[in-house]
Amino acid sequence: MRGQDEVDNCTPSLSSRKQLFSNTASRRSSRRFTPYGRTPKSRQLKGKNHEILSNGTAERSRPRDRRSAVETDEEHESNLKGLTNKSWKLFKMTPLYKFNTESSQLKKYSSQLSAHIEAERQKGLFIDNATSSKAYISTYKGLRVSAADKEAVQILIKGRNRGGFGDETVLLTCLLCSVEMEHNPVEPKLRDKFAYYPLLMVKGLVSLTDGLITWMQSHFDCVITPMIFSAHDLAWMVAMWSGTTTEPVHKSKPVELLYKTPTDCKGIDKITFTIESTDVKDLWDRIHDDKGSEFSSEEVTMFINSLESHFHSLFRVKLSALQLYSVGTSLSYIGDVGRLKIFSADHVLWILRYLTVLSLEHFTQSCS
Amino acid sequence: MTATVLKPHNKLPQYNTVTVLLVGAEGTGKHELAKGIISIDEPFSVQIRTATCLPLSTEDEESRPRIDFICFIVDLTNRESMRVVEESVKHVDLRYFLGRSCFVALKVKCPEKRGVGLELVSEFCDHYGAPILYGALETDQEQITLAKQILNMAKVSAGLVNNISPLLIDSTRRPYDTQLL
């Protein structure tokens, strides 16, 4: 009995794990002639279903008490709102080994994480930090959309200011989530051992973030790397989201494109291209075919090209020769090193869904 | 219109010489690549011509040698370079796409800086039926590898390899997009 337990506990070696997570043959065959990853020709603009699974499929099928349904909806809404107007740093993760979202397990993790942070603090790693801090881990409802998704998990690290006065303040907020993942890349027989969360969002002190990441990497045997967006990905985002506005168009934020100039161009390091959202919306409506829920790569290219050719005709600067590194729309602001700020609570799921897709693409490409 | 189209067979070839034309936007590293190609020791002489876009000017039409091979250079971090190539390709004779031209995709190693989608490039190359070479020019090694690949193809198209024609090479090639297979 004991022996079997030990066999269960041992982690597969790195090479065998690569095979286990390798994706279907179809992706491999499409990459046969290029060793480099590629993006699909079209992407879903919105999620397929906007209904949120609250507590797994079992509960959904049962007729629910009306009042409790309203309450959970409100909770979901406030949870989604809690993600807006914060600047997050995005990371991508490999599957977590033996990560369990049961509340007793989460409690255990929080005490272990607290101990880890305390140990790091005593080593003197956090100079600018509070006296003592404590970790709280809980599930975060409202982000689970498809059956392949796991319930999101929130990690909060709270502490008192230096000197130990006053109330506890939140030093770090961290969210592990996956929103409308199409398929789970983990093999079915390993799914009870590996929990896959494509996205890790962190807001907090850098030193604490590093501490959290080292703890997670050693504790759950995973690798956490910053999410980096290429100019191509950013072009997709700005094209997909600039035509969708929540508020009346005249009030919403302008669309912003930030370009980095080459290093041999002295005296100027970036060009900010700001366009009124009404004008962008007008252009977007002309380019995007309203019937389909998909957005194609031709539409993206056309959208970006028309903006840049307009800029060229005004200022004689070829923006297409420069590197796009940051985009802002009325929904969100995204930078190339994984900075994210969401403005609209209604579109949190859209944005996180797209980021989930991107992270999943990176993951499956690196495995196959 | 016909005068601006570059043709492979309207001039006599030079003895024991390969002429390569590199077409690419400014700042894509045409000259580094050209130096790399010239530095390779071969028993024939190599001439390189560069252009930032096609069509070539009609002024020095007479003095220009026959162009055996055309390389279209795309810098993947630079969308302008892709646009230049798309425009230039229209001014090239059809026969160049039967094994006498190739596309070169540069800076493939840093996906986070990529501005041109790879699927866009490979789809474009499939439309024209020309091969793509993926490479970089940052180190000498990369430069030489790329230069050798180009020179091997250029050698064939200049007729310096016995019993191999550019058409033979082209007919053994397969498209990049597997959906076309």
Image (cartoon, rainbow, N blue to C red):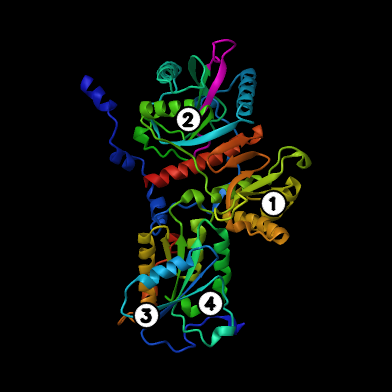
- Report the chain holding disc 3: B
Three-letter code, disc 1: Trp
Chain of residue at mark 1: A
How packed mark 1 is, by other alpha carbons closer than 10 Å (few <14, some 14-19, many 20 or more), is many
Quarter of the figure with the N terminus of chain A: top left
SS label for mark 3: strand
Label 1 sits on residue: A284
Disc 1 is placed on an element classified as helix
Residue B92 marker: 4
| Vertical position of residue B61 compared to residue A53: above or below | below
State the separation of the CA atoms marked 1 and 2: 34 Å
Calculate the distance from the C-alpha at mark 1 to the C-alpha at mark 3.
Answer: 53 Å
How many angstroms separate mark 3 from mark 4 (CA)?
Answer: 24 Å
The residue mark sitting in front, 2 or 4, is 4
Residue B172 shows up from this direction: no
Q: Which mark is in front, 4 or 1? A: 4
Residues at marks 2 and 3 on the same chain: no
Q: Give x and y (percent) for residue A347.
A: 63, 36
Residue A344 against residue B34 in the figure, above or below: above
The residue that mark 3 highlights is B45
- Vertically, is A180 above or below A55? below
Q: Residue at x 75, y 50 (%)?
A: A279
| Badge 2: chain ID | A
Is residue A73 something that shows in the picture? yes
Amino acid type, callout 2: Lys
The residue tagged with tag 2: helix, strand or loop? loop
Residue A150 numbered mark, or none: 2
Host chain of mark 4: B
The amino acid pointed to by label 4 is Val
Q: Amino acid at mark 3?
A: Ser
- First in sequence: mark 3 vs mark 4: 3
Do callouts 3 and 4 point to residues on the same chain?
yes
